[in-house]
């Protein structure tokens, strides 16, 4: 089949998932178009992909699941037997039901999954876990995944012969409750609004960026990264408790799982 475009549909509040996805995409010789759902959208964009497009869906794992916000956006992204690959990045704990949930969503929306992978990375909440991953060795594995996807796309005229099985259980794990709410230090905040503009959940008011709506905040810490004044942070007590807990259960040297 003569392929049209590579559609990159992703959620990446702190940039690691995007990096992994781009490394995969670099190895697929198709013109690419990005749909970045890490930026808050009041209205869900409606996307319809053609049978000769190739889609990559990439997510960070949140509590062993697809981030709920992204799952919501995906309801308006449909294919027409469009081939798709799935990428989940996770902070060296576990990815549990995330790949299965992502597969169920996209399959239900008209995509045909031809490959999937879970890549362990630096933990966005506790960066000393999996520190600086993806590293050189990880990038090699990620590239090879991309090369195999390219091969599949080139060789196949239709994609229904692929039956990609990924681990996970239904019903999926319960959504975790967010307890990390970054606060603005009013003495440092200059109200530049970088945090409000970058928040994926629309949880920071553009009018009063010192305020965070705790009902909407997903605890991704994107605002902390985007704040140039270092005015946004999470309570150090909560952070230390989380570090202690995660250091016990994460393994920084986890290997990638590839499903082809
Ligand atoms: C709210 C939240 C929940 C997370 N839950 C998990 C998890 O269940 N398992 C895991 O191993 N990593 C978990 N992580 C770590 C991220 O999945 C990982 O660091 C990912 O690569 C971040 O991607 P990003 O930089 O594209 O945002 C979590 C991170 C956040 C912010």
Image (cartoon, rainbow, N blue to C red):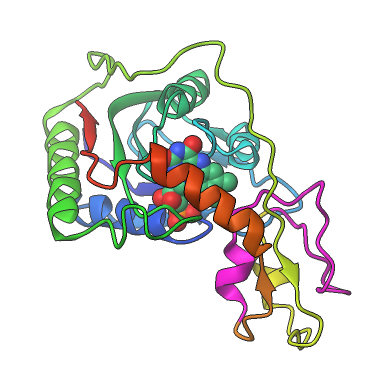
Q: Position of residue 214 (x, y in %)?
A: 81, 51
Q: Is residue 65 above or below residue 158?
A: below
Which residue is pictured at 61% across the width and 69% down the height?
A: 224
Which residue is pictured at 21% across the width and 31% down the height?
A: 258
Q: Give 114 or 213, whichever is nearer the viewer.
A: 213
Is residue 119 on the magenta stretch? Answer: no
Snapshot quadrant of residue 159 = top left
The quarter of the image holding the N terminus is top left
Magenta stretch, main secondary structure class: loop
Q: Is residue 66 above or below residue 124?
A: above
Q: Give 131 or 48, whichever is nearer the viewer.
A: 131
Q: Is residue 9 visible?
A: no
Q: Give 128 or 194, whichever is nearer the viewer.
A: 128
Which residue is pictured at 48% across the width and 19% down the height?
A: 104
Q: Position of residue 239 (x, y in %)?
A: 59, 57
Instruction: Give the residues in magenta.
Output: 201-227
Q: Give 209 or 231, whichever is nearer the viewer.
A: 231
Q: Is residue 155 above or below residue 55?
A: above
Q: Is residue 256 left or right of residue 147?
A: right
Which residue is pictured at 87% across the width and 74% down the height?
A: 208
Q: Is residue 127 left or right of residue 27?
A: right
The quarter of the image holding the C terminus is top left
Q: Is residue 158 left or right of residue 33?
A: left
């Amino acid at each position: 089949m003569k392929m049209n475009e590579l559609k990159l549909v992703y959620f990446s509040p702190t940039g690691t998932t995007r990096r992994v996805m781009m490394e995969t995409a670099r190895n697929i010789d198709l013109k690419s178009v990005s749909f970045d759902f890490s930026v808050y959208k009041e209205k869900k964009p409606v996307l319809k992909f053609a049978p000769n497009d190739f889609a990559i869906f990439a997510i960070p794992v949140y509590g062993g699941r697809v981030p709920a916000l992204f799952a919501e956006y995906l309801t308006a992204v449909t294919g027409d037997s469009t081939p798709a690959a799935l990428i989940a990045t996770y902070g060296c704990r576990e990815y549990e039901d995330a790949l299965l949930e992502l597969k169920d969503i996209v399959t239900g929306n008209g995509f045909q999954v031809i490959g999937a992978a879970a890549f362990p990375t630096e933990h966005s909440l506790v960066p000393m876990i999996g520190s600086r991953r993806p590293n050189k060795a990880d990038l090699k594995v990620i590239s090879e995944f991309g090369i195999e996807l390219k091969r599949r796309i080139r060789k196949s005229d239709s994609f229904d012969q692929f039956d990609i099985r990924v681990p996970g259980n239904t019903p999926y794990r319960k959504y975790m409750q967010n307890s990390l709410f970054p606060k603005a230090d009013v003495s440092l905040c200059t109200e530049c609004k970088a945090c409000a503009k970058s928040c994926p959940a629309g949880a920071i008011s553009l009018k009063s960026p010192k305020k965070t709506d705790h009902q909407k905040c997903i605890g991704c810490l994107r605002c902390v990264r985007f704040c140039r004044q270092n005015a946004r942070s999470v309570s150090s007590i909560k952070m230390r408790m989380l570090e202690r807990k995660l250091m016990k259960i994460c393994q920084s040297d986890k290997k990638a799982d590839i499903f082809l």
